[in-house]
Image: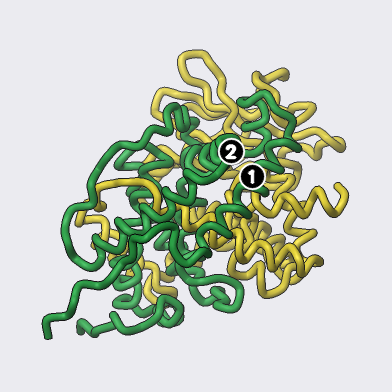
Amino acid sequence: METDTIHELTAAYALDALDEADEREYEDHLARCPRCREDLASLGEAAAALAYAPEAPPPPPALRGRILEQARSERPNVVPLRRRTMWVASAAAAAAACAALGLGLWAASLSRSLDRERARQASVSAILADPSSRRLALSSGHGSVVVGSSGRAVLIVSRLERLPNGKVYEAWVVQNGRPKRAGIFHSGQTTTLLSLPVPSGSQVLVTQERAPGVDQPHNKPLTGAQA
Amino acid sequence: MPRDLAHLSDEALVALVARSDETALAELYDRFGRVAYGLARRILRDDALAEDAVQEAFLAAWRSAPRFVPERAKASTWLLTLVHRRAVDLVRREERRRAESLGDEREEIAGATDEAVWLRYERERVQGALRKLPDQQREAIELAYYGGFTQSELADRLGQPVGTIKSRMFTGLSRLRDLLAEPELDERTWKPTPSTS
């Protein structure tokens, strides 16, 4: 992308309207472009002002208590349980840390892709640490699916063969015989937060696909689990 | 122990949150919880999901406050950005039919407290600025920000090249920024109710 074009992405980035690939490209550019960082500061403020326009009733009073209670339970020295699950997210965290170095101080607080990664890690950790989560074994010893109480699920795979370049693994949630895309992952990636909930009675399947974004599985499932 | 944090700036509050100060988090919620919920509800069109988004956003703030850099953004921008991201991620994940109608529901912000008066003022100011944008720019901005559509989804939906959508967002948001920076959009001014002490 030429500089003028990528410079214009500042507004879409401030509005959270970039696709993930553009977002990464834009953040790479941002790390090198003081003009974009300056623009982002003021456009980001204008975008945040849009939060004031909707008319809405006040939030239910209980929400405040729930937030404070969970915050208390998450203080680093209060819940050592979280440490147990940290290794899972370590690969992603390492990638995020590298990106942060490249982006400098700016990224540490405002990077969208880092924030997205952290949110995923937090969800994965929460599901894995939740004692009420159910663990479903994947067939042929390929790992498991851990389903949290909300139905959100983490897929943990092992011993899947290395894929040739360009190919991906895709997870599917099948309900009433209809498979729906639930996330792609690559060779070497062990943990994937599924983008769809896994209700009881559904199935989780993993296929190998030629490219991300196909609408239906094109290949025989490599492994799967019944919820 | 309740402490009075009302005199602190938003940025000072976030600095306390970064040191795991719960009363500071509570104060931050009291300042921004209502706006956050209004935004999340507009995007998600569902009360329970909106609560989830607000909760996740404040917990993200709790965890990442140590990384907040006041030189880069105002604390309010940082926090509302987190809320917006959580709500947008949720709406995309839920594959909800987004922004079928962007018509506003009228829900008056009741009360004459300083907070209610200020919120109403701020809302009218932003709505007024939005109304001054050319239709196509406003449409692109509203569908992106409140609808959670990416620029390529918008290009499909509006039948325009991505480049056109990109420029509409850029020109529109730049103009909005300039409009909001004007001292007054009209004669209305907000004055705090006189203190009775």
Query: How far across and down, in percent of the image, does residue B137 sit?
Result: 60, 40
Across the whole image, how many numbered discs are drawn on residues?
Answer: 2
In the rendered image, the residue lying farthest to the top is: A177
Which chain is in green here? B
The structure residue drawn at horizontal position 30% and vertical position 73%, both measured from the top left corner, is B27
Report if the CB atoms under discs 1 and 2 are less than 8 Å apart. Answer: yes
A189 relative to A86, above or below: above
Query: How far across and down, in percent of the image, does residue A28 sit?
Result: 78, 59
The structure residue drawn at horizontal position 69% and vertical position 47%, both measured from the top left corner, is A189
Query: How far across and down, in percent of the image, does residue A128 sit?
Result: 47, 52
**Which quadrant would the C terminus of chain B be assigned to in this image?**
bottom left
Question: Which residue is tagged 2?
Answer: B140
Which numbered tag is attached to residue B169?
A: 1
Can residue B192 be seen here? The reply is yes
Q: Chain of mark 1?
A: B
Which chain is in yellow here? A
